[in-house]
Amino acid sequence: MQYRPKVWIGTLIVVFIIGFEVGFQPVRVVPREKGGLAVLEFNLGQPAATDEAGLTKKAEEIKGKLIKAARRDASWIPEARFVTDQQLRVSTVILMEKNREEDRTAILNELKKEYPKVQAAPSVTTAGEGEQPVASLGPIGIYRPMPHVHLGLDLQGGAHVVLQAMPSTEMTFSTPEDKPMVSGEAAQKPKGAETKTGEEGKAGEAKAGETKAGEKKAAETKAAPPETKSGGEKAGTGETKAQPTGASATPAAGAPSETRDSLEQKLTDLLVTQGATGVDVQVVAPNLIRVYTRAVGEKEADQERAAMRRWLQEKYRGVKIEDKASSVFLGADTAEKAKHIIDLRLYSMTDIKEPIVQKQGSDRIIVELPGVRDPKHVTDLLKSTAQLEFRLVPKRYKPTGAKMDNYSSWSDSQTGQPVSEAVVLTQSDIQFSGRDLKPNAMVEQEPESTYWEVRFELKEDRKQDFARFTRDHVEWIMAIVLDGATKMAPVIRSEIPGIGVISGSMTTQQASDLKLLLNAGALPVPLEIVENRQISATLGADAIRQSVEAGIVGFIIVAIFMIAYYRLPGLLADMALTLYIVLMLALLSTWSPLQTTLTLPGIAGIILSIGMAVDANVIIFERIREELRSRTTTRAAVEAGFHRAWPAILDSNVTTVIGAAALYFFGTSSVKSFAVTLLLGVCTHLFTAVTASRWLVNMVARTKWGENRALLGVEAIRTPASSPAGGSE
């Protein structure tokens, strides 16, 4: 090796500085638009609203007033929401710590105009808050050196969710409108508000909007007066025969009177005895039954449907019973498809960093969300099937609460009776679905409003069909349904050329969620949460502290041992080891081809690789000692020691790389973290132990300290006064 100490020293210093800056980021540009977050809470002294929808609307209204009063950009307040009906939480972007109190005072003064009893509550500390520069030089800030590594679930807290893919079969059974299956009180209280999607189908939670075509408004949320007709519509118009829900309906002739609850219970018992699982029977109208099961295959679904039909035909003799069914089953690639869609959804959520998504078996998906602030909101998005449907509503129906964005109740012009949303949707044929949309939905703010809208566009091969459909059905109502809940039901006023807008009383969060779901696509099957563990950030902080303490203690012990046993070479090895740690943190901060989320097993991998880095130096220094004992010069001993130690070092590290690769490709998420840090450690210590240590030892070997064998841990050479006659030793 050519002797170039100036080049070697300069290279090592530059590598150390770059690694330290990347890993610890002590010097960086102070963000102007997005700095640290100050989370401020205020007790208004009185309830702001009576329900969740009102609180959400009020929070957005307050946010708009605060931004307007402060004359700041909208990005100043990323979030404003009510924790309780009186407790308001506001997050503001701050550049310096003093900005926190300035924002608190400004917000408090503005809130006092509407809420005289408002008081500021103690601040809430959140991840990323309070990291402010120690000093600033123009746009450059100097921060405390802190490792900027993405921490895993066990180190910073978060959510561990296990989702299971479930098959689903939906069956509907109906009788003529003059032959209901239940009567009396059951006819007056249809179970219409209940849908398959649970909370998303409850009344009051569906948000409405408008459908637009470019800049021209092509549909309105105001419903047109329905047309009264004597019978069903023609085939192909999207309308089928209706079932009345009036209280005057009477049971089928000859059939015993059934209440809604008793009929549901009997049908549930029937399916359970047939071996059906996940049974949910809903009498949504006196002559309409909706049944959900978890049939695992076509044969089982057909058997359940046939059993239901036989029982109903025997129960209601002489009554025509119509039925239809739709099913989704688990396939070999179902979990992979669901995992891909979950990946897309999480990738689009900017507040989630380094999520881990992996399959478990053929029907389960494990999702780890480190540092997530609102796990319930995220899990609701993950399990949402996001089935978007455009349904043509029969003309006899119109929503009664459209002006209030409430589509849970409708009216029937033929009977004059109210009908439920479930009945209307059952009779409204699906014309288009989310599969017909391009994944380019965008969120925009409504003109002269604090609410937001989502713009969507149909695929090229469906635009003409959509335009023709809307042209042929002017003055009809088209319900836009997401996961069984009507989001809006506008009247088609003119032809819509494949571009529309879903708008209404949507907040920023609701509009963003809808855009995310539309762009990511619908899940192939429903998902259920079978495990949902919340890991405390406090436990993570304790784990980090204990791991860092263990690492520091281990490093000090190793450093002392190397100096005590190998003297000067041991000190040089410690310098190379320090460089190794800096480079490891830099790689963990920037390395993207591998999963670099740091977990507790990952920290164990780093500590293990520190020992392996020292092990390489031990092999090299022992070789150098052997060469020195054979009375060679220090420079020759160093060259020979590194040359002869290299094969052993290479062999041991190759076997370690093979083991780490096997752990990475076949292990779970925690094992992968260990494998990645171990793999990066091997690659890094090959540079520090073989290259950096060699440069340092070579430089010392050419100085007077290098000739001092005691500093190298080798006894001095003793030259005998005279040699024995006849030969030498």
Image (cartoon, rainbow, N blue to C red):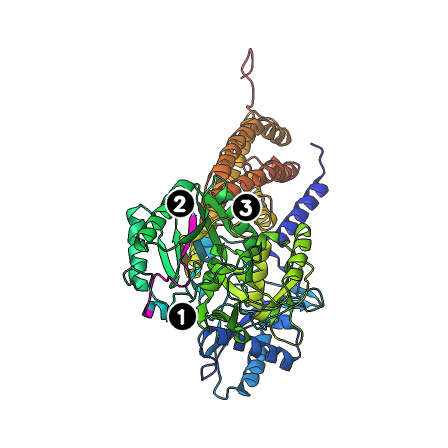
Q: Amino acid at mark 2?
A: Ala
Q: Residue at x 58, y 41 (%)?
A: 684
Q: Nearer the viewer, residue 495 or 360?
A: 495
Residue 612: x, y in percent?
50, 38
Label 2: how many Cα within 10 Å (few below 14, some 14–19, many 20+)? many
Label annotation for residue 94: none
Residue 54: x, y in percent?
49, 76
Q: Secondary structure at mark 1?
A: loop
Report which quarter residue 30 is drawn in: bottom right
Label annotation for residue 301: 2
Nearest to the eye among marks 2 and 1: give it.
1
Asked if one can make out residue 460 in the rendered structure from this viewpoint, the answer is yes
Q: Quadrant of the N terminus?
A: top right
Q: Is residue 40 magenta?
A: no
The residue that label 1 is drawn on is 246
**How much space separates mark 3 and mark 2, taking CA atoms?**
42 Å
**How much space separates mark 1 and mark 3, taking CA atoms?**
61 Å
Nearest to the eye among marks 3 and 2: give it.
2
Label annotation for residue 595: 3
N-terminal label among 1 and 3? 1
N-terminal label among 2 and 1? 1
Asked if one can make out residue 562 in the rendered structure from this viewpoint, the answer is no
Residue 111: x, y in percent?
54, 84
Nearest to the eye among marks 1 and 3: give it.
1
Q: Are marks 3 and 2 in contact (CB under 8 Å)?
A: no
Q: Amino acid at mark 3?
A: Gln
The region drawn magenta spans 168-185
Using the image, determine if residue 716 lies above or below residue 468.
Answer: above
Q: Residue at x 60, y 80 (%)?
A: 65
**How much space separates mark 2 and mark 1, taking CA atoms?**
32 Å
